[in-house]
Amino acid sequence: MASFVPPTRVRALASAACFVLMCAPAAALLFASPAPVSAQGPKREVSPPGYSEAINDAVHELELGNFAEAREQFRRAHAVSPNARTLRGLGLVEFELRNYGESAALLQQALDSDAKPLEGKLRSDAEKVLQRAKGYLGEVHVAMVPEVATVTVDGTVMELGPSGMLVLEVGDHVFEFHAEGRLSTKQTVSVKGGERESLRVVLRPLVVASAPEAAPVAKPADEAKAGPRLTTTQYVGIGVAALGVGSLVTSLVFGLQAKDKLDRADCGSSCSDARSKGLNDDARTSGNVSTATFVIGAAGLAGGALLFFWPRSSQQETKSSGASARLTPALSRGFAGASLGGTW
């Protein structure tokens, strides 16, 4: 027989059951410890400002075939964040521009870079383009004497490393070598793809040619026979002596005139008529002139002889080669003399 449960107790049991059913989940959430996160999704890398825009513009220009513009955009991106991806882009652009040497260098740097390294297809594509670029390049090994010589290739100064190796594009290239104190030289080298050429250059010392000695000037036969030339002093002495001789001749002329006039006057101790007196006066004047010119002529002749025979110095002998003189006689009625002219 079932036991009887009072209504008040039934209501209490019902309330307790309801509390348990409604509040247990909330309590469980409140007191339960948070569950550990077993795995997190990959963290997205944030690019520096301006990098993504430059990369997008570079790719767009590359797709349009605007390689020069694409190169500038890749350079902008590389300046913001240098990495293997920007180096790869620059290498591809240089290849399209047929700058195979620059392309090979950039692609090799991209493959060696640890910043955003190339993986998968990006790496395999870069390796293929690198091999194609090397097919358009050749090596030239340069050995120089002296080693400090400057090397220019097609007008551009090149830096030789310790190995002396240059990587150049296929074709003919003009090498020029310069060194201080050495003769410069020029040589053309034909570079072939994937091959190596060797070039050895020896620059010869530069010899400064001395000025040739002046050959002695042959003297004319008559000048050689005449002996040493006269000095300036000797020329002056000749001129003075010539003037002295002229004065002596003048003195002789006036002396003869004075004697002739005295003979015609025939005055004796005194002259009575005017004619005789005039002749006598003229004879006296002529005699005075004769005496004066005689003294001057004798002095000139003596001075000329002194100048002519005066001992010459080495300096005078040197200057005498450019000296010249000309003696011109001067004769007139009642006068005889000479004039001297020239350079000294």
Image: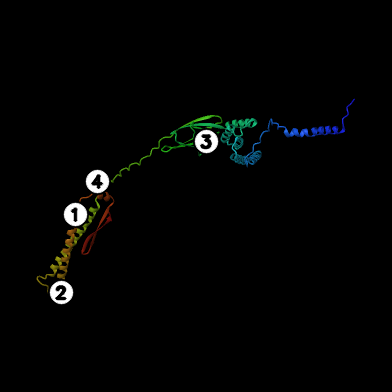
Could you tell which of marks 4 and 1 lies nearer the N-terminus? 4
Estimate the spatial distance between the alpha carbons at disc 1 and disc 2, rounded to whole Å.
48 Å
Disc 3 marks a residue whose amino acid type is His
Estimate the spatial distance between the alpha carbons at disc 4 and disc 3, rounded to whole Å.
68 Å
Left or right: 18 as drawn, with respect to 55:
right
Image location (x, y in percent) of residue 338: 23, 59
Disc 2 marks a residue whose amino acid type is Ala
Q: Which residue, given by chain and number where applicable, does mark 4 sit on?
A: 225
Q: Quadrant of residue 99?
A: top right
Could you tell which of marks 4 and 3 lies nearer the N-terminus? 3
Q: Quadrant of residue 149?
A: top left
Disc 1 marks a residue whose amino acid type is Leu
Q: Which residue, given by chain and number where applicable, does mark 1 sit on?
A: 306
Name the foreground residue: 335 vs 157. 157
Image location (x, y in percent) of residue 256: 15, 64
Q: Which residue, given by chain and number where applicable, does mark 2 sit on?
A: 274
Estimate the spatial distance between the alpha carbons at disc 4 and disc 1, rounded to whole Å.
26 Å
Determine whether label 3 and label 2 are within 8 Å by CB: no
Sort mark 2 into few (<14), some (14-19) or many (20+) by Cα contacts within 10 Å.
few
Mark 4 falls on what kind of element?
Answer: helix
Q: Which residue, given by chain and number where applicable, does mark 3 sit on?
A: 173
Could you tell which of marks 3 and 2 lies nearer the N-terminus? 3
Looking at the rendered image, the quarter that the N terminus falls into is top right
